[in-house]
Amino acid sequence: MRRVPSARWVTRPDPSSTLRCWETAGRLNIPVIIHTGEPPEFFKPLDMHNERWLELSLFPDRRRYLVPVSWETLSAERDELFRQHPKTRFIVAHFGWHANDLARAGRLLDAHPNIVLELAAILYDLGRTPRAAHEFFVKYQDRILFGKDTYAPTEFPYYWRVLETNDEYFDYYRDYHAFWKLYGMGLPDNVLRKVYYQNALRVTPGLPRNGWPR
C-alpha cells in the first residue's frame, strides 16, 4: 500500500488475479463498466485558465493535480487494458472524459471494437458543441449508452432537451459544472432509441426484453 496526497489508501491488486477477472468477464459475456480518472481539468492547476475552477474551489477533494499521476497516464493505461483484452466488453463511463474532444473519442472507438461509451455527467460538453455531437452520435450510434450517476428526476429533462431538441441557449442544471449555455443536438428517433435502450439490450445480457417502446 502507498500513501497519496488525497489522503486515500491505494492498494495494488495482484496482476494475475486482475488478469483472470477481465478474461473471465469476457468468457462469460459480462460487460465491465470502467471509470478511469476524472475530468481532465481536475488534473490541471486551479487558476484563471481552468474552466472548472468553481467546482475545484467548492470541492477541494476533487483537485487531482495534487496526486502524483497525470490524466494522460491514466488514459494510456486504460487504453492498454482495452487492447490486452479484446474479448472483454467494456462500458466506458463518462465518455472516457473525452466528450470535450470528440475526435479523440472517435479514435478510441475505432481502435477498440470491444468498448462502448456511456454519457453520464458529460452533458455540459455535448450541449456546447451540438453539431459536432450530433454527427458523432449518428456515426457511432451503436456504441453509445445513456447513463446517469444518480436517479434524479429533476435532471432528466435537461438530457431530453439536449439529445432530442434543437433548442438554443438554455441553462445546465448544475452551474458549478458548466457556466456556459447548452444547445440541443436534435438527434433522429432511430438514434435516440439505440442510445436510450436498444444498445443496452445488446450489450447487457439478462435485461428484460419486454416493455420497451418500438
Image: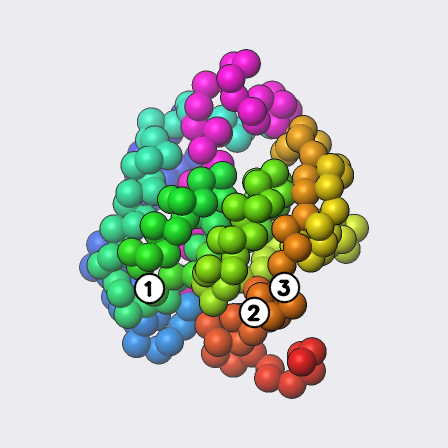
Q: Is residue 116 left or right of residue 127?
A: left
Residues at marks 2 and 3 touching, judged by CB atoms closer than 8 Å? no
Q: Is residue 134 visible?
A: yes
Q: Is residue 92 above or below residue 176?
A: below
- Give the magenta-colored segment's residue range: 32-58
Residues at marks 1 and 3 touching, judged by CB atoms closer than 8 Å? no
Q: Is residue 8 left or right of residue 155?
A: left
Residue that carries the numbered disc 1 in the rendered image: 113
**Which residue of the protein is positioned furthest toward the top in this rendering?**
48
Residue that carries the numbered disc 3 in the rendered image: 188
Q: Earlier in the sequence, mark 2 or mark 3?
A: 3
Q: Is residue 85 left or right of residue 64?
A: left
Residue that carries the numbered disc 2 in the rendered image: 194
Could you classify mark 1 by the number of other residues whose Cα lies within 10 Å: few (under 14), some (14-19), or many (20 or more)? some
Q: Residue at x 67, y 28 (%)?
A: 179
Q: Is residue 90 above or below residue 211?
A: above
Three-letter amino acid code of the residue under disc 3: Pro
Q: Earlier in the sequence, mark 1 or mark 3?
A: 1
Is disc 3 placed on a helix, strand or loop? loop
* Label 1 to label 2: alpha-carbon separation: 17 Å
Three-letter amino acid code of the residue under disc 2: Lys
Q: Is residue 196 visible?
A: no
Three-letter amino acid code of the residue under disc 1: Pro
